[in-house]
Image: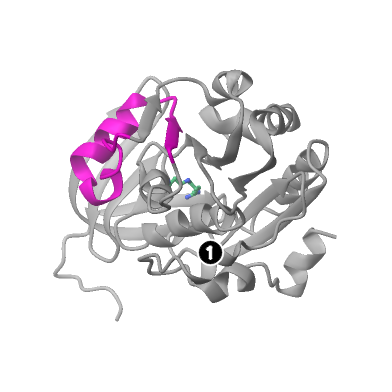
Amino acid sequence: MGLDANKQQTWFTEYQTDSLSLGLRVETILASDTTPFQKLLVAETETFGRLLALDGAVQTTARDEFVYHEMITHVPLFMLDAPKKVAVIGGGDGGAIREILKHPSVEEAHLVEIDAEVVEASRRFFPEISCALDDPRTSIHYTDGIRWVKEARNFDLIIVDSTDPVGPAEGLFQPQFYQTIADALTDDGLMVAQSESPFLHQPLIRHMREGLETAFPHIKLYLAAIPTYPSGLWSFLMASRKSPAPSPRHLTLNLETRYWTPQLQTAAFVLPRFVEELMA
Ligand code: AG3
């Protein structure tokens, strides 16, 4: 407990708001680059293992990535009996793709990432996260997700695995984008988007919910605990034309997971009152 003055004092600090930060002691900096889109940092941290940060914001760490990647994928996938075509907008580390391909019905997993250097960094420094990017079912498109979705059709699930709503991801939080996603889905299809922290980003969550409501009749929010993201409590918004219900296969598929369980498939939607109020 506490600070050991004998250890090297190199810290990664994410300034999460203008009055709140998260610090991780760094053992080694592995990559620090400016891509055409953002600043990219890969570092070995003592507490959470390898860290990928974009524009100073934690995207993923080796020790807690499973929470985010399992929850952004399995919860919507298990609302479907036989998902076949899935797309991830953003998510260049490949973690969501790895989880999607655990579902045997999936035939096509499309990764739509604007920044090829994120994918390259993940292949190089996070082999356990990027491991499904070479699967024959995976296609990678290095392009703007907004443009790509306009041409997409017949998807069972579209996942928006974006960075925060500043910089390259800004357009991924706009109502017009949600309408183009709706047009790219089958009638039974779903979309899910990471929607930041209910402690710190309530206006954003409301804005996203209202935007989603212009394109979809059913919107639900669910939660997961992600220790390296701002406040540690994270949310996801799921939207669909039909009222979603877990497919019976969520009880029988016996996926290898570390966070998601069949019980969480429904329990993740049970909300604390202050979060429920955000959705009312
Ligand atoms: N997407 C990033 C979630 C936002 C984190 N925000 C922050 N640290 N300020 C995660 C990408 C993982 N595939």
Quarter of the image where one finds residue 188: top right
Question: Which residue carries the number 1 mark?
Answer: 249
Region in magenta:
107-136
**Amino acid under disc 1:** Arg
Q: Which residue lies furthest to the bottom in this view?
A: 1
The C terminus is located in which quarter? bottom right
Query: Left or right of 151: which side holds 91?
Result: left
Q: Is residue 264 visible to the viewer in this orientation of the structure? A: yes
Place of residue 91 in the rendered image (x, y in percent of width and height, measured from the top left): 43, 39
Task: Name the residue rendered at 38%, 53% in the picture.
Answer: 102
User: Of 29 and 5, which appears nearest the observer?
Assistant: 29
Element type where label 1 sits in the image: helix
Place of residue 88 in the rendered image (x, y in percent of width and height, measured from the top left): 49, 37
User: Of 227 and 250, which appears nearest the observer?
Assistant: 250
Q: Is residue 165 visible to the viewer in this orientation of the structure? A: no
Task: Name the residue rendered at 27%, 40% in the picture.
Answer: 122
185 in relation to 188, above or below: above
Task: Name the residue rendered at 67%, 51% in the picture.
Answer: 238
The N terminus is located in which quarter? bottom left
Q: Residue furthest right?
A: 280
